[in-house]
Image (cartoon, helix red, strand yellow):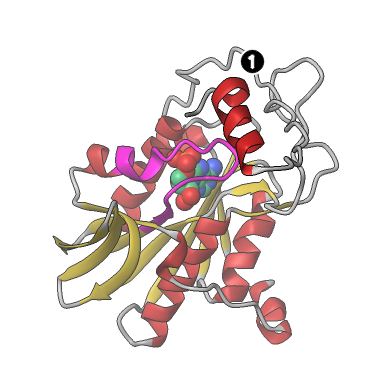
Amino acid sequence: MKVLVAVKRVIDYNVKVRVKSDKTGVETANVKMSMNPFDEIAVEEAVRLKEAGKADEIVAVSMGVTQCQETLRTAFAMGADRGIHVLTDAELQPLAVAKLLKAIIDEEKPDLVILGKQAIDDDSNQTGQMLAGLLGWPQGTFASKLDVGDGSLQVTREIDGGLETEKLTMPAIITTDLRLNEPRYASLPNIMKAKRKPIDQKAPEDYGVDIAPRLKTLKVTEPPKREGGVKVGSVDELVEKLRNEAGVI
Ligand code: AMP
């Protein structure tokens, strides 16, 4: 079984994101970038399938600037076998990423494609669903457990008030939720080995895909500053404030 994983380079989740002064987006210059955390979970799941003897090849795909190669090397150090880098400096919106992934999938013919449920920079939560739609494949989104059988798989999803388990026939699209697994730290020998794994460098034009943005960002603003709390002297005062100041009771 061949597994394809999509890995996006995003601002590291530990970084306090700053909005650009002209409100056109967030500051990315001189900011630490890393693999999208949900994509680390996707790679980890693929590697576990390989270790369990259920997958025999893991192909990692990243799209964007030159440094996406570092993201692919991180995937290699965790256990992915080879990479495809679609190089572009242009803004890639979820539909463009989904169309490019579809073109790659048409060539690579994987049995299973694992994406993150969302990229923590744009929070779109669209690419996996759009990709499944474009391919006409079944999708198991927000997976918190995966059981891969012969030609089919079971996906457990966390939904309001419980768990839902779906059976999907392969090929299929999976998007990862936080509790699917805990990604491993790459060992030093594996980081060294990752340097020798091959990356196929491509451009959007190679796939004949129109990547022009369809959505326009009007402005990006900081969330309102949190106001400081107050200490109340009594329950009566608390009730009075909740009723007359906060207006919540
Ligand atoms: P989004 O729909 O933007 O929230 O992204 C959902 C998932 O799509 C991510 O977790 C990645 O697995 C994948 N993805 C989105 N953009 C890219 C990209 N530029 N390169 C590789 N994978 C991507």
* Residue located 41% across and 68% down the image: 180
Q: Nearer the viewer, residue 242 or 17?
A: 242
Q: Position of residue 4 (x, y in %)?
A: 39, 61
Q: Position of residue 202 (x, y in %)?
A: 54, 45
Left or right of 111 on screen, residue 64 = right
Left or right of 86 on screen, residue 1 = left
* Residue located 51% across and 38% down the image: 123
User: Which part of the image, by quadrant, shows the N terminus?
Assistant: bottom left
Rendered image quadrant of residue 77:
bottom right
Which amino acid type corresponds to the residue marked 1 in the rendered image?
A: Lys
Q: Which residue is mark 1?
A: 219
Relative to 28, say whether 189 is above or below: below
Magenta residues span 114-131
Q: Position of residue 185 (x, y in %)?
A: 64, 77
Rendered image quadrant of residue 163:
bottom left
Relative to 68, say whether 155 is above or below: below
Left or right of 70 on screen, residue 6 = left
Instruction: For label 1, count other residues whose C-alpha is less than 10 Å away and answer few (under 14), some (14-19) or many (20+).
Output: few
